[in-house]
Image (spheres, grey):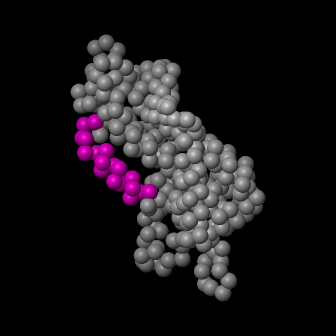
């Protein structure tokens, strides 16, 4: 390694290997971040679970009535959607701050850069684990309505409205949520690494990314379903919005995790899109790590 250029692939991959080897360090730091956030709180990190439960119950109940959808299928849909959206958006938003927030450590502690990336993503995994409790509770309450084939939107008698997609109901296919989450975590790592390096060099990036994430939340089917956009004439505004929704990359990430857990139709298109994004994203992140790893300490 001695004599190798700071911009060599060997140093970039060595950074990753060394960070993986020091998993006890970033694992401890990630857990300490959560404990620090809820220090002196009576119930501590349980507030994470309570917050998710309140959000899912309030918005799930409200929008099920606004959209005329059965709460037994819509509440689990909204709950799982929020769970995975919070994880993804946190990786993106906190990823842009990951090196800036660790300025002191980066300047004075000679450690692999990837340690801070693992620390950020691991912290979000711990947050996610707390929110899984809410899904289990919702599943127990509404299991009977998810266990059989169902539609999110039923055909209204006497109208020409198209019925929603028929979903097969819960099955062993729910286990696909596990590789889906692993794939999403892998994407969280490259997003944190790439956006972290870019935002450290250009400090206007974090507020710009924050603004776009608000827009993407609205455009991503989390509190509404894609079935609501069906039936638009070709060229109509409704049909255009439906196509735009399919171009939204967050839609595909949400679906590979949510569909198995709420017994919806599995589309391998979502997996293919996420797979392509994973390869492209990691390629860009590794190039950024190779070229700019040694400069981050000067930029923070």
As drawn, which residue projects farthest toward the top?
2
Q: Is 86 on the left or on the right of 104, as rendered?
A: right
Q: Is 245 on the left or on the right of 291, as rendered?
A: right
User: What segment carries the magenta color?
Assistant: 200-217
Q: Is 143 on the left or on the right of 75, as rendered?
A: right
Q: Position of residue 284 (x, y in %)?
A: 36, 39
**Quarter location, residue 57:** bottom right
Q: Position of residue 207 (x, y in %)?
A: 30, 48
Q: Split into 4 quadrants, where in the image is the N terminus?
A: top left
Q: Is 66 on the left or on the right of 290, as rendered?
A: right
Q: Position of residue 165 (x, y in %)?
A: 63, 68
Q: Residue at x 67, y 47 (%)?
A: 136
Q: Split into 4 quadrants, where in the image is the C terminus?
A: top left
**Quarter location, residue 293:** top left
Q: Is residue 204 above or below residue 115?
A: below
Does the magenta segment cover residue 211?
A: yes
How many marks can you see? 0
Q: Residue at x 47, y 59 (%)?
A: 220
Does the magenta segment cover residue 5?
A: no
**Quarter location, residue 10:** top left
Q: Is residue 58 above or below residue 239?
A: above
Q: Position of residue 146 (x, y in %)?
A: 71, 59
Q: Nearer the viewer, residue 272 or 227?
A: 227
């Amino acid at each position: 390694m001695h004599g190798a250029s700071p911009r060599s692939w060997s140093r970039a991959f060595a950074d990753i290997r060394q960070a993986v080897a020091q998993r006890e360090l970033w694992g401890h730091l990630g857990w300490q971040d959560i404990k620090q956030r809820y220090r002196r709180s009576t119930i501590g990190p349980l507030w994470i679970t309570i917050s998710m439960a309140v959000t899912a119950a309030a918005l799930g109940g409200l929008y099920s009535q606004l959209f005329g959808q059965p709460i037994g299928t819509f509440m689990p849909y909204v709950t799982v959607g929020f769970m995975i959206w919070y994880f993804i958006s946190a990786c993106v938003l906190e990823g842009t701050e990951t090196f800036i927030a660790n300025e002191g450590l980066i300047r004075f502690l000679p450690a692999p850069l990837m340690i801070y990336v693992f620390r950020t993503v691991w912290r979000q995994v711990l947050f996610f684990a707390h929110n899984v409790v809410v899904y289990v509770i919702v599943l127990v309450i509404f299991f009977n309505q998810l266990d059989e084939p169902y539609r999110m939107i039923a055909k209204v008698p006497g109208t020409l409205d198209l019925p929603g997609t028929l979903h097969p109901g819960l099955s062993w296919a729910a286990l696909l949520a596990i590789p889906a989450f692993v794939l999403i975590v892998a994407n969280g790592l490259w997003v944190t690494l790439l956006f972290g390096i870019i935002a450290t060099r250009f400090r206007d990036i974090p507020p710009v990314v924050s603004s776009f994430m608000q827009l993407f939340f609205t455009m991503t089917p989390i509190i509404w379903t894609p079935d609501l956009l069906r039936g638009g004439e070709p060229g109509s505004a409704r049909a255009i919005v439906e196509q735009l929704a399919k171009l939204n990359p967050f839609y595909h990430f949400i679906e590979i995790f949510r569909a198995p857990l709420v017994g919806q139709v599995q589309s391998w298109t979502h997996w293919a899109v996420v797979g392509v994004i994973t390869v492209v994203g990691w390629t860009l992140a590794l190039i950024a790590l190779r070229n700019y790893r040694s400069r981050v300490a000067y930029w923070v």
